[in-house]
Amino acid sequence: MEIVSIEKKTFDEMMARMGAFVEKVAALQRKGDERRLARWLTGDEVCRQLRISPRTLMKLRDKGFIGYSQIGCRFYYKPEDVKRVIPLVGTICPADR
């Protein structure tokens, strides 16, 4: 085993920098988690916002009018994709409204 000896001042500075680095990483992780969770809407939320049925939402998905991500059996939508499709809802599925 090799032993390395350094000055206490150098060791304390190293530890302070490491602590600051750990804090920055933790803050970035929290910020990323908040953004990730805040961005996605569930199918129920989208149906309420667009005033459409789940079946109509499925048609929009299948026809490629709205982007989504699927985790297991659940679908999630970005708010900007939902806003983009608002003017199209009445023209795409007029009988479902």
Image: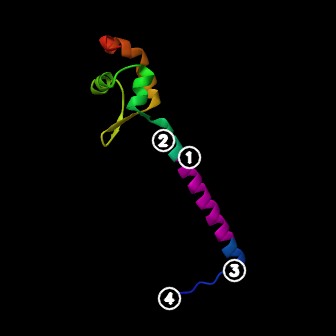
Q: Earlier in the sequence, mark 2 or mark 4?
A: 4
Q: Earlier in the sequence, mark 4 or mark 1?
A: 4
Cα distance, mark 4 to mark 1?
A: 41 Å
Task: Check disc 1: other Cα within 10 Å, few if <14, some if 14-19, many if 20+.
Answer: few
Cα distance, mark 2 to mark 3?
A: 45 Å
Find disc 2 in the rendering and name its residue: 37
Q: Position of residue 62 (x, y in %)?
A: 27, 26
Which residue is depicted at the point 59% across and 61% down? 22
The segment highlighted magenta reads 13-32
Q: Nearer the viewer, mark 4 or mark 1?
A: 1
Find disc 1 in the rendering and name its residue: 31
Q: Position of residue 32 (x, y in %)?
A: 52, 46
Magenta stretch: dominant secondary structure: helix
Find disc 3 in the rendering and name its residue: 7
Q: Nearer the viewer, residue 42 or 67?
A: 42
How many labels, in total? Answer: 4
Query: Is 54 contained in the magenta span?
Result: no
Which residue is depicted at the point 40% across and 21% down? 85
Question: Residue placed farthest to the bottom in the image?
Answer: 1
Left or right position of 37 against 20? left
Q: Earlier in the sequence, mark 2 or mark 1?
A: 1
The C terminus sits in image quarter: top left
Q: Earlier in the sequence, mark 2 or mark 3?
A: 3
